[in-house]
Amino acid sequence: MNFRQFAINNVVRNKRIYLAHFLSSTFSVMIFFIYALLLFHPDLKDGLKGSSQTVTVLANQGLMIAEIIIFIFSFLFLLYSVGSFLKTRKKEFGIFLMLGMTRRQMNRLLFMENMCIGIASIVAGIGLGLIFGKLVLLICGSMLAVENSLRFYFPLKGIVLTAGAFLLLFIIIALCSSLMIRKGTLIDLVKSEEKPKPEPKASRLLSLLSVVLIGGGYTGVFIFAWGLYLFPLLFVSVMCVIAGTYLLFTQLSVYVIRALKKKERLFFRRTNLLLLSELTYRMKDNAVMFFMVSVISASAFTGIGSMLTIGDPRLSSMTNPYAFTYVNSGDTDSAVVDRHMRKIEETLVDHEVPYVKGSYQLLYENNNNYIIKLSEYNRLAKALGYEARVLDRNDLAFNTAPNIAARKKLLETKEDSYPYSADLYVGEQHAQVQMLPPATDIVIPMDSETGVYIVSDDMYSKIREAYIAEIGMDVDFYSNQTTFFVVKDWMATRSFAPELLDSIQKDPPEKGYIDFSSLVVDWLNNKQTNGIILIVSGLIGIVFFTFAASFTYFRLYADLERDEAQYRMIGKMGLSRLELRKIVTRQLVLMFFLPLLVALIHSSVAFAALYQLVQFSVLEHSLQIFMVFVSMQIVFFALVRWRYLRHMYSKLV
């Protein structure tokens, strides 16, 4: 047997330990390759049909940044996992040295072992990426709202980039592994497993501080969402939650377990003595890992859920319910406006899309508010399926919500505060009106936070005529007019909206101005922008989640030999298989699901705050994200528990 065969046999003999390392490495390579597959995709590189140049730039830059992030975190993760494996093999390395192996030969052995796993991971990862490539392109095409999806192509550049990047990474990891073993004498290596661990301790003050920091962080997030839009407050709140989470695992968890151990009736009941004693050490040893898993998982949940919510068509239509919006100023050539209107209506008729047309002319109130007549408001409201409003007297009026933020404020207004008097000023003209309860449906969409007053037609005409006379303008004068086209199934305009938008933008008036927008085009750009972010954050989140699960596996199997000796000794005292299964299951449940539970709580708070910001239910998307990741964790937990118990049963007398 030559040295190369000896290295390969070492990997095969330690397949139980190296399996998670190999699978995680393979998964990292596969995700990196998928990003490369998208990065070099012709449709994304040249630009998606109907999308803006911004989306194309974001796609290219976002995917490149994702490649760098995956590479860096893969390096850190693989370095950590190799370090975990080497710790479990210190005794083995000590025996090699006792048998005459030189340090140089040991370094060569470690290098060959790591490269063996690395090359196998690269081949397996790229192979799996090619197998699932078409499925990934179909899913990404749906997320980017591509009509005919993203076509499959042979990604030669992606294969070369992935193979080259990870070959370099595994060479660096292999070189670093020899440095990890160089520390310590021969006696330290041989007796590495015999050193006792000190009993974990925790501070009551720091434990209390963890609760205060998390509670204060949650409060700050909600204060931000309730209207105090100070981003420094949001940043500080998030940092408080992160710091509190760290103290939760390093201090509070150990403090709680030590407190439970002091309750003799609980501690000495059945197998609780073994369970709590072992948990104290496991929580302290794995505290940093649990903290990382919680923060990474919470970030993945929140990021993916937020992107899914923002890209939801229902949110777009709630913000602006009109398929097409056309704005023109008063001095725009009427022939150009008429030509544009005919173009829009003829296009809708040609494509057999039913529509309702409505418009309004604004009066600018001196206090940066707008005044609109009731008949124009009611026509648009009825077209959208909302209830028409009635003003019995000319001196009555009501507000309407121009956007989600204004709608939120109107909804918070107490009903018993109506009616109340309001003064409207247009130039030198003054009118006093009695304000009725507002209309909270978004019928007159605007980005600004100005107030929109709906007054009777007679009141509107009276104010307008007096104002026109005051400034000496023609009776037909108006500052601008906004025309809306209501289409119930506005997604049906996708096939022709980009061309219609382009044709009108290429026919500008010689004087005045026009502005034409399409809801489906705006949604498409928004969807593709958020789709790119979702693809980037989603795949990175899955990689992080896989790394987090693998961390748990590494930590569990790093203590495997110690656990074997412990349970073998306790088995001689009468520990049954059923009792062993209960102890192991309870420990693994905490190890696998406690960080996930903390992440779910953090994410739930973030989603609740997001609902306060956009007034749009995020329950559906948040549940989808939670179910996917929890299902993945349950499957991984079941597999690890089965393998771990199977191994322990074989050692139990």
Image (cartoon, helix red, strand yellow):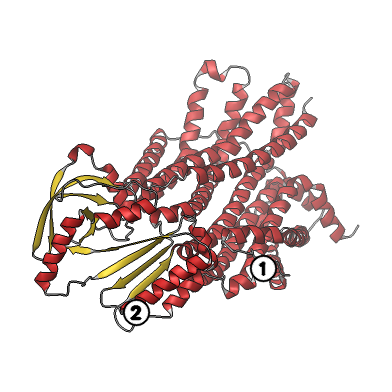
> Please, what is the three-letter code of the amino acid marked with disc 1?
Ala
Depth order, front residue of 138/132 = 138
Mark 1 / mark 2, whichever is N-terminal? 1
Residue 44 spot, x, y in % from top left: 59, 70
In this image, 6 relative to 390: left or right? right
In this image, 384 relative to 173: left or right? left
Residue 567 spot, x, y in % from top left: 71, 28
Mark 1, mark 2: which one is toward the viewer?
2
Q: Name the residue under label 2.
A: 335
Q: Is residue 229 visible?
A: no
Q: What element carries label 2?
A: helix
> Please, what is the three-letter code of the amino acid marked with disc 2?
Ala
Depth order, front residue of 89/405 = 405
Residue at 40% across / 41% down in the picture?
A: 214
Residue 94 spot, x, y in % from top left: 75, 49
Q: Can residue 244 be seen in this view?
A: yes
Question: Residue 650 falls in which quadrant of the image?
Answer: top right
Q: Name the residue under label 1.
A: 165
Q: Distance between the residues labelled 1 and 2?
A: 61 Å
Residue at 60% across / 47% down in the picture?
A: 548
Of all residues, the one furthest to the bottom in this rendering is 510
Q: Compared to 563, does 96 lie above or below? A: below
Depth order, front residue of 612/335 = 335
Q: Compared to 248, does 7 lie above or below? A: below
Q: Which image quarter is the N terminus in?
A: bottom right
Q: What element carries label 1?
A: helix
Residue 523 spot, x, y in % from top left: 47, 61
Question: Residue 363 falls in which quadrant of the image?
Answer: bottom left
